[in-house]
Image (cartoon, rainbow, N blue to C red):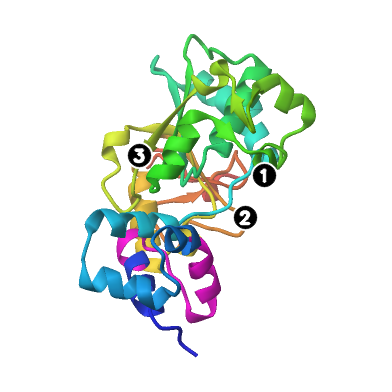
């Protein structure tokens, strides 16, 4: 049975972020909006939808849309991929590059920053302050203003700090601040955070050697996911790689993109002047 107000809010999510909510996911929609509903004294989704209809407010609508796209993030999610990026892929890209621009990594849909901070920790542990004279810049983006601001602060609660982090890494890279833990300055300075809607132009972010966009596209409508993926892959530098979440694929969504021959689980736009990976024996 349809829940009153569901269609209006699901449509807002689709139009604002490309995210798709099916009627069977009404519980998820309610869960992600629960803090807003409590704050605004709404008891039901219908009351919230009626308010949006009666008193349109772009700022409030953006907050709701951002809340609906929130996803659970944790430290060192898929640590094998992150470790391979730091230990193998980044040094390889540095060796192959002809210029002297800094190496750049983009974490798309970065939430409250755990993925970006995990990379920063690995870089710190590996002593990779410089690769062939270049620094490694990490940029994390998310549609949600609140998540972006919290990520920038480097503050995590007791539950978050224990999800994916070993005790040794927690004590080495974070310091206790009242009831929270804050990433130390040397970790925070490795990462920059920006509020960014993936449905909008991404060219202002610049180009990247590595793009991580994991478990984001699968929540979007197929045509929208294809448009977003196309825009993101166009921000890849020569030899740049894009990583998706487990079970996600780019072929079929984006033309001219194929799986990397050298980096399992990654995709790239092949150099047309050279044989594609599928042509390599």
Q: Depth-wise, is mark 3 or mark 1 nearer the camera?
A: 1
Quadrant location of residue 53?
bottom left
Q: Please, what secondary structure does the residue beneath circle 2 have?
A: loop
Image coordinates of residue 154 in percent, x first then y, are 53, 30
Residue farthest to the bottom?
1
Reading the chain from its start, which is encountered first: label 3 or label 1? Answer: 1
In which quadrant of the rendered view does residue 225 lie? bottom left
Q: Mark 1 points at which residue?
A: 78
Residue beneath disc 2: 246
- Mark 2 Cα-neighbour bin, 10 Å: few <14, some 14–19, many ≥20: few
Indicate the position of residue 29 as horizontal and vertical percent values.
Answer: 48, 68
- Say which element carries label 3: loop
For residue 49, above or below residue 213? below
Residues under numbered marks 1 and 2 in contact, where contact means CB atoms less than 8 Å apart:
yes
Who is closer to the viewer here, 263 or 117?
A: 117
Q: Quadrant of the C terminus?
A: top right
Q: Magenta includes 20?
A: yes
Q: Closer to the N terminus: mark 2 or mark 3?
A: 3
Q: Which residue extends farthest top?
A: 133
Q: Are marks 3 and 1 in contact (CB under 8 Å)?
A: no
As measured in the structure, the alpha-carbon distance from the residue carrying label 1 to the one carrying label 2 is 9 Å
The x, y position of residue 186, in whole percent, is 56, 15
The residue labelled by disc 3 is 235
Compared with residue 19, is residue 213 higher up or lower down, i.e. above or below? above
Regarding residue 134, the answer to whether it shows in the image is: yes
The residue sitting at the front extreme is 41
- Under tag 1, what secondary structure? loop
Q: Is residue 104 left or right of residue 15?
A: right
Name the one closer to the observer, 96 or 25. Answer: 25
Q: What stretch is highlighted in magenta?
A: 14-32
Give the alpha-carbon distance from disc 2 to disc 3, as whole Å. 22 Å
């Amino acid at each position: 049975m349809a829940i009153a107000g569901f269609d209006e809010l699901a449509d807002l999510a689709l139009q604002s972020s490309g995210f798709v909510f099916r009627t069977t996911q009404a519980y998820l929609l309610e869960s992600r909006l629960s803090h807003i509903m409590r704050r605004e004294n709404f008891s039901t989704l219908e009351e919230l939808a009626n308010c949006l209809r009666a008193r349109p407010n772009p700022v409030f609508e953006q907050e709701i849309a951002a809340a609906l796209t929130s996803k659970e993030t944790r430290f060192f999610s898929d640590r094998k991929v992150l470790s391979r990026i730091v230990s193998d892929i980044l040094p390889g890209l540095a060796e192959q590059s002809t210029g002297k621009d800094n190496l750049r990594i983009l974490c798309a849909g970065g939430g409250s920053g755990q993925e970006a901070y995990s990379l920063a920790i690995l870089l710190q542990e590996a002593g990779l302050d410089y690769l062939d004279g270049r620094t490694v810049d990490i940029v994390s983006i998310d549609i949600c203003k609140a998540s972006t601001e919290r990520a920038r602060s480097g503050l995590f609660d007791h539950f978050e700090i224990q999800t994916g982090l070993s005790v040794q890494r927690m004590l080495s890279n974070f310091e206790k601040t009242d009831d929270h833990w804050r990433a130390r300055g040397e970790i925070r300075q490795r990462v920059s955070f920006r509020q960014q809607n993936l449905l909008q132009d991404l060219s202002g972010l610049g180009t990247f050697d590595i793009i991580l966009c994991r478990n984001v596209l699968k929540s979007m409508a197929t045509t929208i996911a294809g448009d977003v993926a196309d825009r993101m892959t166009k921000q890849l530098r020569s030899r740049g790689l894009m990583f998706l979440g487990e079970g996600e694929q780019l072929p079929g969504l984006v033309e001219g993109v194929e799986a990397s021959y050298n980096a399992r689980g990654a995709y790239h736009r092949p150099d047309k002047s050279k044989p594609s990976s599928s042509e390599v024996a």
